[in-house]
């Protein structure tokens, strides 16, 4: 029950406020009306039911219902969680089909319908139109999902489940789905993964088919989605008729992208000509997924295939229509740009492909909300987002120290810059960092370590090095090293080298720390982290106080914490 309960809690944990609108969709899910199974399944069904009873933790659920986390959820989500908890009190193997359905439908619908209401109820229906209608009206739900019958059986030594599903729609006063679905005991993977050749798999396989039909049926009848579909078509017409074939200054683009030979099919330019989005498309050569992974052309690629990802054909042939954008920002009289939104998809012609790909602007905030008018914020959002100050995020107190801390440190120098610019500066810095490390390792640290081992093998029998630690100035670096002596005793030492010298020093602010085993990165983080804000994921240690007070501090003419290593 704990797993069932916290599925929705995790899904909705980030929602702190909820403007109550008309609930959509509203689905009441009932318990199975009739169950039937071969005697050969009795042991497995009994063991499953016994395991549910053992996992039932009443105290834990009661505590959660009083918690701040639960009380902060929107009212509809609280009702859904409470129905999960109540339903779980008498759950068994067959009723679990209802529970799985509730969780999966909530997961799939939530992104489009945050005001959904899907409730479990330990109630049965005989499946008649009259009975389903009465339940729908009494409980005030548009849809009632009824499991008329669930049967487990064997055929040719393979286990199967047959689930008869009914979906009643109160608006049309009809049973929109009345169908049986059969699933075998093979693990389907993905969302319905289960222990292979188990009765759980038979239920999961049948439900995976049934729930797909249920989602489709509810979606095509949704007023919200119908309205969105109509708006989407109107926007597509605007994009196709007003923007797609509009003349543009290709020469302007060529002066900026002088190294590219690809021909754009459209260019969007902001009013002051400091930002643009250029669109490109071509027919790619035939390739399978293995060929694509070997291709170094692009780092991030989206594949929109007519085949399902579970199908063998998905990996055998990648769609051949290849499109991407180049987005750019002018900053301090310099253009920063990057290739983005690389996509392989299927189109019958280049013209059709251009129309399909250009239509992505709908998802990229090109239009005002619920409108076909150009969004003036298009040039400041989505494709042109800026680096935010994570400490100002309302969830900083919740996630700052545990999840976002490293990102916050690495972002400090770029706050307020467009991500395109920041990414370019990050790549430039990383390139300089890599060159600095290679130079210092090859020309200073490695030669000195070899001399240490040669001249003093008793103390320096083996040296295992870790990553260098240095500031963005790159004038010196600390190298944590695990030193093993001839007795096999391992201790953590720190060596320091300057960029303009062949000398190395031992940094002795910390006494050499005895280490068990070969891993010592966490000890390095603990020690240096006690002096400054740092870990190995931080790009550079830019704390001047750390370097001046704990590394480069002098007593007279000599360093207090650095001792030169003599050959």
Image (cartoon, rainbow, N blue to C red):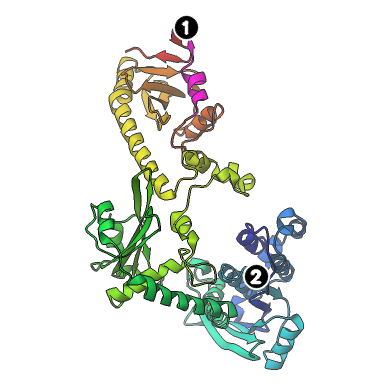
Query: Which residue is drawn at the image coordinates 54% and 44% (left, top)?
Result: 389
Q: Is residue 26 rendered magenta in the image?
A: no
Q: Position of residue 493 (x, y in %)?
A: 45, 23
Q: Position of residue 259 (x, y in %)?
A: 23, 52
Quick one: 239 or 57, which is closer to the camera? 239
Question: Residue 495 lies in what quarter of the image?
Answer: top left
Query: Which residue is drawn at the image coordinates 62% and 62% (left, top)?
Result: 7
Label annotation for residue 556: 1
Asked whether residue 43 is in view, the answer is no
Q: Position of residue 201 (x, y in %)?
A: 53, 72
In the picture, measured across the screen, residue 17 lies left or right of residue 281, that is right
Quick one: 348 or 141, which is closer to the camera? 348
Quick one: 509 or 114, which is closer to the camera? 114
In the picture, measured across the screen, residue 69 lies left or right of residue 337, that is right
Q: Position of residue 181 (x, y in %)?
A: 53, 83
Q: Secondary structure at mark 1?
A: loop
Cα–Cα span, label 1 and label 2: 70 Å
Circle 2 sits on which residue?
115
Quick one: 268 or 206, which is closer to the camera? 268
**Does residue 556 sit above or below 490 in this rendering?**
above
Asked whether residue 72 is in view, the answer is yes
Q: Which residues are magenta?
A: 543-557
**Does residue 415 sit above or below 309 in this rendering?**
above
Query: Which residue is drawn at the image coordinates 25% and 56% (left, top)?
Result: 254
Q: Quadrant of the C terminus?
A: top left
Q: Is residue 547 rendered magenta in the image?
A: yes
**Does residue 406 sit above or below 5 in this rendering?**
above
């Amino acid at each position: 029950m704990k797993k069932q309960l916290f599925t929705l809690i995790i899904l909705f944990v980030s929602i702190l406020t909820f403007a109550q609108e008309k609930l959509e969709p509203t689905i009441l899910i009932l318990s199975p009306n009739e169950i039937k199974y071969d005697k050969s399944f009795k042991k497995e069904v009994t063991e499953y039911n016994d395991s549910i009873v053992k996992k039932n933790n009443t105290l834990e659920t009661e505590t959660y219902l009083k918690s701040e986390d639960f009380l902060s959820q929107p009212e509809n989500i609280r009702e859904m969680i409470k129905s999960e908890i109540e339903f779980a009190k008498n759950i068994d193997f067959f009723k679990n089909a209802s529970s799985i359905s509730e969780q999966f439908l909530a997961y799939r619908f939530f992104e489009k319908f945050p005001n959904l209401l899907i409730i479990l109820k330990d109630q049965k229906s005989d499946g008649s139109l009259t009975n389903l209608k009465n339940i729908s009206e009494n409980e005030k739900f548009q849809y009632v999902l009824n499991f008329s019958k669930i049967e487990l059986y064997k055929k040719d030594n393979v286990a199967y489940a047959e689930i008869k599903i009914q979906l009643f729609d109160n608006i049309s006063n009809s049973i929109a789905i009345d169908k049986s679905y059969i699933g075998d005991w093979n693990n389907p993977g993905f969302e319905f993964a289960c222990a292979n050749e188990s009765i759980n798999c038979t239920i999961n396989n049948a439900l995976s088919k049934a729930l797909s039909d249920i989602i489709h049926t509810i979606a095509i009848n949704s007023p919200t989605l119908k309205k969105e579909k109509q708006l989407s078509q109107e926007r597509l017409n605007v994009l196709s008729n007003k923007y797609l074939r509009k003349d543009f200054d290709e020469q302007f683009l060529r002066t900026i992208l002088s190294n590219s030979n690809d021909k754009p099919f459209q260019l969007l330019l902001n009013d002051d000509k400091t930002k643009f989005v250029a669109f490109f498309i071509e027919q790619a050569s035939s390739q399978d997924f293995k060929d694509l992974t070997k291709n170094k052309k692009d780092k991030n690629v989206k594949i929109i295939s007519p085949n399902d990802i579970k199908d063998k054909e998905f990996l055998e042939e990648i769609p051949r229509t290849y499109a991407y954008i180049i987005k750019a920002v002018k900053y301090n009289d310099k253009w920063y740009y990057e290739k983005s939104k690389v996509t392989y998809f299927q189109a019958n012609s280049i013209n059709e492909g251009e129309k399909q790909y250009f239509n992505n602007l709908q998802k990229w905030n090109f239009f005002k909300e619920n409108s076909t008018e150009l969004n003036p914020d298009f040039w400041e959002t989505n494709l042109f987002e800026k680096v935010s100050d994570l400490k100002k995020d309302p969830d900083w107190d919740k996630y700052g120290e545990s999840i976002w801390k490293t990102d916050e440190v690495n972002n400090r120098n770029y706050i307020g810059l467009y991500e395109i610019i920041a990414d370019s500066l990050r790549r430039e810095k990383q390139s300089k960092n890599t060159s600095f490390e290679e130079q210092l390792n090859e020309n200073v640290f490695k030669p000195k370590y070899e001399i240490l081992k040669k001249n003093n093998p008793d103390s320096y029998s083996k040296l295992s090095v870790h990553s260098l630690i240095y500031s963005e100035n790159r004038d010196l670096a600390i190298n944590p090293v695990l030193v093993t002596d001839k007795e096999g005793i391992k201790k953590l030492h720190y060596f320091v080298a300057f960029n303009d010298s062949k000398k190395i020093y031992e940094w002795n602010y910390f006494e050499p720390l005895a280490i068990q085993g070969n891993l010592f990165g966490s000890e390095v983080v603990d020690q240096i982290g006690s002096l400054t804000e740092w870990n190995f994921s931080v790009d550079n240690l830019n704390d001047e106080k750390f370097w001046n007070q704990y590394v480069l501090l002098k007593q007279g003419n000599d360093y207090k914490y650095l001792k030169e290593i003599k050959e």
